[in-house]
Amino acid sequence: MTLWLFFAEGGWGMWPTLLFGFVAVGGAAWFAMRPEPRRLAFTGAMWLTLAMSMANATWTNLAAVCSTLENPERVPDAELVRTLFAGLKEASRPAALGGVFLTLVPLLLAVGALRGRSSD
């Protein structure tokens, strides 16, 4: 498994997830370096935008899997279960990518909160 294959399996929704993830992590790093409330508000809003982007991409992928599975000409009954699991794997890629960012952002915010308290 290469990173490119992982990204390609996730479909178009990987792009906004990646973009919003980088912006959210950048905002959190900015807050960690200089803890100011306005930076925290921006980062929180970007964290939420990232979460919504992940959810939208994952649900869109799940809809594509269901659309494919409903047509017996595209997926014969004998291949239904294997195709379902392959589709679910690919549909989960945006959530897996975004989960990395959703974890890093609060970690950096915690560093900023600690630094903000020590400067008081």
Image: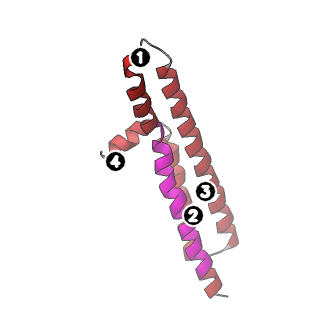
Q: Quick check: 4 left or right of 39? A: left
Quadrant of residue 77 within the rendered picture: top left
What residue appears at the point 45 percent right and 43 percent down from the top-left corner? 93
Kindly identify which residue carries mark 4.
3
Kindly identify which residue carries mark 3.
47
Q: Nearer the viewer, mark 1 or mark 4?
A: 1
What residue appears at the point 56 percent right and 58 percent down from the top-left corner? 24
Q: What residue type is labelled 4?
A: Leu
Quadrant of residue 83 within the rendered picture: top left
Q: Quick check: 70 left or right of 79? A: right
Q: Distance from label 2 to label 3 (Cα)?
A: 9 Å
Q: Earlier in the sequence, mark 2 or mark 3?
A: 2
Q: Distance from label 3 to label 1 (Cα)?
A: 41 Å
Residue interval drawn in magenta: 91-114
Residue 120 placed where, x, y %? 67, 88
Q: Earlier in the sequence, mark 3 or mark 1?
A: 3
Q: Which amino acid does label 3 sit on?
A: Trp
Label drawn at residue 77 = 1
Q: Are marks 3 and 4 in contact (CB under 8 Å)?
A: no
Q: Distance from label 1 to label 4 (Cα)?
A: 31 Å
Q: What residue type is labelled 1?
A: Asp
Residue 47 placed where, x, y %? 60, 56
